[in-house]
Amino acid sequence: MPADSAPKYKKVLLKVSGEVLMGDQGYGIDMATVDTVAAAIARVVKGGTEVCLVIGGGNIFRGLSTAAADMERASADYMGMLATVMNALAMQNALEKIGVDTRVQSAIPMAAIAEPYIRRRAVRHMEKGRVVIFAAGTGNPYFTTDTAAALRAAEMGCDALLKGTSVDGVYSADPKKDKSATRYEHLTYQDVLSQNLKVMDAAAIALMRESKIPIVVFSIREEDSLRKVLKGKGTFTVISDLPAPTA
Ligand code: UDP
C-alpha cells in the first residue's frame, strides 16, 4: 500500500460502537470483549500514540429503536446517551486495570462520575499520555456517536478517525449476507455520501471532509489490528480525498 494513503497516525480518535462491546451476546456489555479492546488500546498507548475514544451505546439503548417507539425522540436519545456513559465506565475500568491512565469526559455534566467535557483539558490529558474517553455523545438528541466521534476528532486535532467495527472495512454489500461483496481499499468522502454507503452518518462524513481528517474503517475484533492500522498495515478501508492507491 503506498505511503500517501496510509500515513503513520500519531494522534487518533478511536470510535468503538456498542455493537463491538456486546461481543457475541445479543445485548449489553461483554466484559471479555471490553478487555480485549482495552488491551489493544494499551499496546498502542504504550507505543507512544495519543489516543482518545468515543464509545457508542447501541448495545444498551438506541433512540431510534423499537423499544423507544412510543417515546418522545429527545427523551429516547438521552437514554441512548446515558448508555454510552455506562460503556465508557466499563472501558475506563478495563484500561485502568492494565495500567493505562484514563479520564472520562461527559458531554452531559455528571460531576460524581466524570469530568465535564472541556476541550483544552482533554487536549492536555492526551499530551500527558492519558486516554480520554468521551461519553454522552455530543450531548444533544438527534445526533449519533459517529457524529460525536467526528466532532471530537476535529476538536482534538487528530490525524485520523479510526472506526473500529466488527467488519474489516467498507464493502460493496453486507459481507455477512452477500458472498460476492468486495472490500474497498480507498473511498473518497464523496463516494460514501453519493453511494449512501453505511459507514458513518452523513454529518460525520461531511465534518471529516471539511476537517481533512481521514477515516479508517477496520475490524477491532482481530488481534493486533489496531497496532497494524496505525502503521498503515493490515486490512482496512481508508476514506479520504487523497487519490486512490494504484497498486
Ligand atoms: N445519542 C444522541 N446524541 C449523540 C450521541 C448519541 O442522542 O450525540 C443517542 C442516540 O439515541 C443513539 C444512542 O445515543 O441511538 C446510542 O448511540 P449510537 O447509536 O451512535 O451508538 P453505536 O451505534 O455506536 O453503538
Image (cartoon, grey):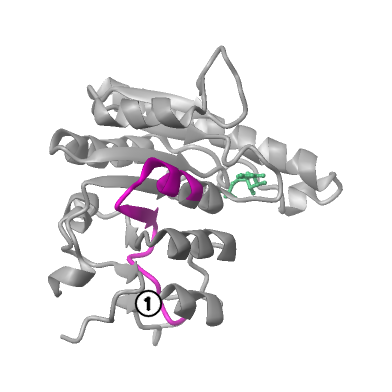
Residue stretch in magenta: 151-173
| In this picture, residue 120 sits left or right of residue 238 | right
The answer to whether 229 is drawn above or below residue 91 in the figure is: below
Give the camera-side residue of 88 and 6.
6
| Res. 131 in view | no
Q: Residue at x 77, y 47 (%)?
A: 68
Q: Position of residue 40 (x, y in %)?
A: 24, 42
Q: Residue at x 60, y 35 (%)?
A: 83
Q: Residue at x 69, y 36 (%)?
A: 79
**Mark 1 surroundings within 10 Å by alpha-carbon count, few (fewer than 14), some (14 through 19), many (20 or more):** some
The answer to whether 75 is drawn above or below residue 8 in the figure is: above
Please identify the quadrant where the C terminus is shown.
Answer: bottom left
According to the picture, the residue beneath numbered tag 1 turns out to be 187
Please say whether residue 214 is one of the residues in the magenta stretch. no
| Res. 234 in view | yes
Please say whether residue 170 is one of the residues in the magenta stretch. yes
